[in-house]
Structure formats: C-alpha cells, structure tokens
Amino acid sequence: MRIAQTVRDVRAARDRLTGRVGLVPTMGALHAGHEALLARARSGCDSVIASLFVNPAQFGPLEDFAAYPRDRHRDRAIFEACGVDVLFEPAVEEIYPPGESTRVDPGPIARVLEGASRPGHFIGVATVVAKLFAITRPSVAYFGRKDAQQLVIVQRLARDLRLGIEIEPVNTVRDARGLALSSRNVNLSPKHRTAAGALYKALLTAKSAWTNGQRSGQALRKAMRDVLDHEEAIETDYVSAAHPETLEELDDVPGPVLLSLAARIAGTRLIDNITLPDPD
Ligand code: AMP
C-alpha cells in the first residue's frame, strides 16, 4: 500500500493506476462498516484508493471535530489488510490551502434533516467530496447507506456537476443488537450502547406498521418517536418519513420511503435509517 500525504503525491500515484479505479472516502476510526465499503471496492475495481481525512468543514463550531476519534496506525493496518493500493492521508492545509474559498452548495436537499440540525454540514461534505473526486479521479466511489442523506447529496453532486463518476451505495453494517456501526459508538458506555438499540427498534417498528398497511407519514413518524421516547437516555432530534430522493416529508406513503432519525445519548449524536421497500 502506498501512502500519499500530499495532493501532488496522490495524483502521481493515481496516474500510475490503470483500469477501473474505486475510491472509498473515510474519516478513519475504521469499523466493519468501512470494511464493507473497502471489500466492495476491492471486488469491483482493478485498483482501490482510500482517503482518511477528518474534514473540519463539515463540523459545526460546537461539534466534536477536535474530539472525533482518531487512530491512524490502527487504520493504516486495516486499509492495508483490506487491499487498498493507495491511501491518501492529507493534512488540512492540503485540502484547504491558505486563501481557498470555493464551496459547493447542494441546494435545498442540504437544508432538511441532518442539514437542518447541522447548518452548513452538507456544504462541507459536498466541498470535500468534490475536491477528493477532482484529486483522485475515480471511476466509482463507494458510500454507505448509513448516511442516507449524504449518499443522496453525493449522487446528486456527481450528476449535477456531470462528473462521470459512478456512486455505489453500500448497505448499513450493524452489531448483533441492530445498532448501526459508527465511529462515534466508542463514546457510548455499555449501558448507553444498549439504550442505542432503540434507534433501530424504532425503524423496525415503523417498518412493520408500513408492511401491515399503515400509509400515513404522520403515523409512521409517531411510531418511531414513541419507541425513542420510551428510552430514558435518548433525546430525540428528529424522526422523518421522507421521499428517498427529494427528502420531502410525506403525508401519504404509498411507495418508497426513507425512514430516518437522529438522537442524542449522553452527548453522543447518532443517526440511522432504512428505506422501504428494501433497496436491494
Ligand atoms: P465516515 O468515516 O463516518 O465518514 O464514513 C465513511 C463511509 O463509511 C461513509 O460512506 C459512511 O456512510 C460509511 N459508513 C459508516 N458507517 C457505516 C456502516 N455502519 N455501514 C456501512 N457504511 C458505513
């Protein structure tokens, strides 16, 4: 595995790659969810580039940028074991050199759900993804369904800016109790990890209501909120039953719907979602 820390080095390494090149962008603190993306890239591409960059532009001033989990040496070993050819590990100044100012604004879909709770978050995401795409020029890039709104925004970015890069979604990897794996889960005590199981339970409760014929968006949102409210440690941020592409809240849910939610447990913010009917 070649490690590149500068734009110049990763461009040179990219120029030597041939065939179908896959990109897996990450913020590190790797877990089995990241490994699923890397495995898909390895099996679907001739060469795999991964990036490890904790992007300051997608964190709000009161968010956990400084405290975000970091373990570069462990991550390098995992990238290597997953068959990564080139690991791009830039410093902040490589991606945001002094004087740069251009930002990518995905529009209204960036301002609902996560974007409403985290103003500017998706401008930071879209900007860094556009930069990583321009720097590494992949054929295909892999993104997790765990971050459903991010996935929709990146798909739209690739389409709207005519980038000619395929975006491949990868299903959410969960622990035995259904909790979606997240780098932030390391902040949860065993007790709070158990409480966090209510997020997936809330989604499954709404799923079973929908499967049994419930077509009211409001009723589906209430079903999720009731499960979360039942868990004392959970402070609900939002519950949503939205159109999977426009992300508009639905009153009637005859067809595809993105059920999503966000909650805080002892200061740690967690998100989860499922799409109905099952996407794969
Ligand atoms: P992050 O390092 O949190 O920015 O995540 C990097 C990529 O891994 C993103 O495309 C995420 O959606 C994806 N990802 C994070 N957690 C999971 C998970 N539990 N299952 C599948 N993909 C995930």
Image (cartoon, rainbow, N blue to C red):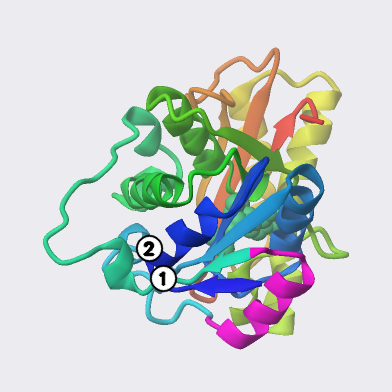
Looking at the picture, tell me which residue is in the foreground, 116 or 161: 161
5 left or right of 19 in image? left
What is the magenta segment's predominant secondary structure? Answer: helix
The residue beneath circle 1 is 90
The answer to whether residue 33 of the structure is visible from this angle is yes
Asked if the beta carbon under badge 2 is closer than 8 A to the nearest atom of ligand 1, the reply is no
Give the position of the N terminus as an image quadrant.
bottom right
User: In the displayed image of the protein, which residue is found farthest to the front?
Assistant: 16
Density class for disc 1 (Cα within 10 Å; few <14, some 14-19, many ≥20) is some
Give the position of the C terminus as an image quadrant.
top right
Location of residue 184 with respect to 130 vertically, above or below: below
Location of residue 146 with respect to 1 vertically, above or below: above
Q: Nearer the viewer, mark 1 or mark 2?
A: 2
8 left or right of 226 in image? left
Type of amino acid at the residue the image marks with label 1: Pro
Residue 228 quadrant: bottom right
Region rendered in magenta: 70-85
Name which residue lies at 60% across and 64% down.
86
Picture disc at residue 7? 2
Classify the position of ligand 1 by quadrant: top left, top right, bottom left or bottom right: bottom right
Q: Position of residue 60 (x, y in %)?
A: 31, 63
Name which residue lies at 55% across and 74% down.
3
Name which residue lies at 77% across and 29% down.
279
Q: Secondary structure at mark 2?
A: helix
Name which residue lies at 36% across and 74% down.
91
Residue 77 quadrant: bottom right
Q: Position of residue 89 (x, y in %)?
A: 48, 71
The answer to whether residue 143 of the structure is visible from this angle is no
* Mark found first going from the N terminus, 1 or 2: 2
Q: Secondary structure at mark 1?
A: loop
